[in-house]
Amino acid sequence: EARGLNEGFADYAQASLLADPRIGDWVAPGQARDCSSPTVRFPARAVDVYAVGAAWAAVLWALREELGAGVADALAFASVFFLEATSTVAAARAALLGSEATLFPAADGQGRHADEIAAAFDARLP
């Protein structure tokens, strides 16, 4: 799962930098990955790193669409500091919530965008 998360971070970083959710469209038209695809889900078994990565990038892109590029980028890249080399998808969710609570604290001890993070993840579950 950790390798898949790495793939997803790489896809999201490129997509966010270029403000275009399509990855590799210029190389393989019609075969590119699309971070904004509503059909991408985390696989039931995380054996395909690219499937895990596509879903993680889709979660991050959904946050970008909901919260704006600045907030989503801050959350995504700060969450890296909460992860380890063996992190799971569940750990990635917790990392986003951890970065959220740190960067955008709310009175209840959670972050101001915790509901949006939960919704983005829940939409990508198998």
Image (cartoon, rainbow, N blue to C red):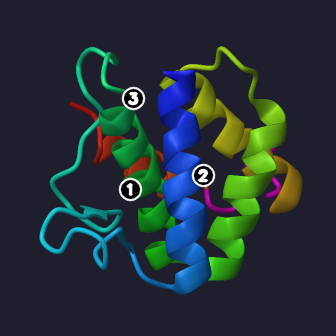
Say which element carries label 3: helix
The amino acid sitting under disc 2 is Ala
Residue 36 x/y as whole percent: 31, 68
Q: Where does label 1 land, which residue?
A: 58
Q: Is residue 88 left or right of residue 42?
A: right
Q: What span is colored magenta in the figure?
A: 105-113
The amino acid sitting under disc 3 is Val
The earlier-in-sequence mark between 1 and 3 is 3
- Whether 104 is drawn above or below 42: the answer is below
Say which element carries label 1: helix
Residue 95 x/y as whole percent: 70, 36
Residue 116 x/y as whole percent: 49, 59
- Whether 23 is drawn above or below 123: the answer is below
Q: Where does label 3 land, which residue?
A: 49
Q: Where does label 2 land, which residue?
A: 114
Residue 7 x/y as whole percent: 51, 42
- Mark 1–mark 3 Cα distance, whole angstroms, equals 14 Å
> Could you tell me which residue is drawn at 35 percent across and 68 percent down?
24
Q: Nearer the viewer, residue 76 or 15?
A: 15
Residue 111 in the magenta stretch? The answer is: yes
The earlier-in-sequence mark between 2 and 3 is 3
> Could you tell me which residue is drawn at 35 percent across and 44 percent down?
55
CA neighbours of label 1 inside 10 A, class few (<14), some (14 to 19), many (20+): many
- Whether 78 is drawn above or below 33: the answer is above
Residue 17 in the magenta stretch? The answer is: no
Q: Looking at the image, is mark 2 or mark 3 nearer the viewer?
A: 3
Q: Looking at the image, is mark 1 or mark 2 nearer the viewer?
A: 1
Q: Which mark is residue 108?
A: none
Q: Is residue 98 left or right of residue 29?
A: right
The amino acid sitting under disc 1 is Ala
